[in-house]
Image (cartoon, helix red, strand yellow):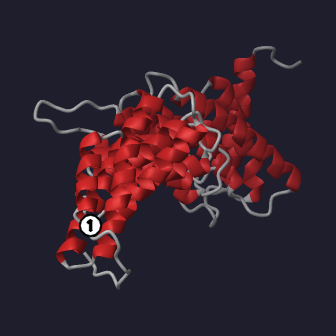
Amino acid sequence: MSDPRPGRRLGAARALALLALAACAGCASVRGWLPGGVPEELEPEQVPAALATAREDLERGDNERALEWLQAASRARGLDPALRDEVQRTLEEAAARRIEELSAPDQDPGELADMLELGLPRQIAVTASIRAAGILRDRGEPMEAFELIEKVDRKFPLHHERVAAGDLLAAIGLELAQDEPTFFGFFDTRDEAQEVLEYLILHAPWCARSDEAYETLADIYARDGEWRLAIERLEQLVLNHPNSPRVPAARLRIPEVRLSSHKSPEYDRSELDRARRELEAWLRDYPRSENERAARILLADALLRLADSDLVIAGFYRRVDNPYGARMHATRAIAEAEAAGDAGRVERARAMLASLPERAAPIEEARP
């Protein structure tokens, strides 16, 4: 008659399993022992006993030791397919329990992250690592979380948790970007935010918040005077996320950054003219936007700078005795100043035009 007490049955099963394993402890394939007294690798005939021991450990709640036995069993060569499948199923169960165990608030996320290096099946290792990264972020260690995600991506570039990892990267980078300046005016985490968000748009462009990442990067670069990079990130937002609600603001921000980056009307005419065209297109596409007034102010700024540019060039052509070029630029300055509604500049441009010969044949223009 069998003993109805489960503890005694488990004890007997464990004793038999350990005896079976001890009988093969001297096998040549056993290359070492893990901290819990588990061999690193088993012979095929040792696997059933190891499997029984692991199941007993699971019933006792010793998920870590069960996982060690199952890892050793999974490394055995030449297993019967049915036995290998059974080992794999039990290994996945033990790993899932261990991941949940290490996800508890009182546990060290480092142990969870270490599962990436335990030779576990890819899906288990990745799940544990992304879970650990989330815990690190929640505990105020965002860069450690970012570095762990980087490590997972390097090891398993096409892993199944890419969407979750992308969302986590976005949360980390955007939170770092919100850091306020210190007493001396320095930002503690802006550089880290830039690093994380640049990684995000390169490796996880499908992320739901990548449009926000582009926008935030543009703000970071604009604050640092990196005008070209700021414009590039805004253009990428518009191109890669055409349906994003952030697109209208990004399209308006692009010419604003252009105007901020070019202060001298003598040398930046092509960029000023590009900003003018972008603003005119924006006003056509968003005729009743709440930002219409801001767009018209920027357009007036672009037009006035273009008028100043044309007046400077007209004066240059007058000095080098090229009345045709001078008249052309003065005439254009009048149109630009009128469009901007600046009567003073209109008067100056007309005075310039009046000072020139009424008729002037075109000659080869000198470069101003």
Report the residue at 38% width, 80% height from top.
362
Say which residue label 1 marks: 314
- Asked if residue 66 lies left or right of residue 201, the reply is right
Q: Secondary structure at mark 1?
A: helix
Residue 164, quarter of the rendered image: top right
From the viewer's perspective, is residue 279 above or below residue 355? above
Residue 216, quarter of the rendered image: top left
- Asked if residue 310 lies left or right of residue 49, the reply is left
- Quadrant placement of the N terminus: top right
From the viewer's perspective, is residue 202 above or below residue 214? below
| Picture coordinates of residue 215, whole percent (x, y) | 45, 41
Q: Decide which of 260, 194 is in the foreground and name it.
A: 260
Total number of numbered discs in the rendering? 1
**Is residue 196 in view?**
no
Residue 285, quarter of the rendered image: top right
- Asked if residue 193 lies left or right of residue 223, the reply is right
- Quadrant placement of the C terminus: bottom left
- Asked if residue 187 lies left or right of residue 339, the reply is left
Q: Decide which of 6, 250 is in the foreground and name it.
A: 250
| Picture coordinates of residue 128, whole percent (x, y) | 57, 39
Report the residue at 21% width, 66% height from top.
315
Report the residue at 78% width, 41% height from top.
89
From the viewer's perspective, is residue 135 above or below residue 205? above
Q: Amino acid at mark 1?
A: Ala
| Picture coordinates of residue 142, whole percent (x, y) | 38, 37
Q: Decide which of 300, 329 is in the foreground and name it.
A: 329
Which residue, as the protein is rendered here, is positioned at the far left?
A: 184
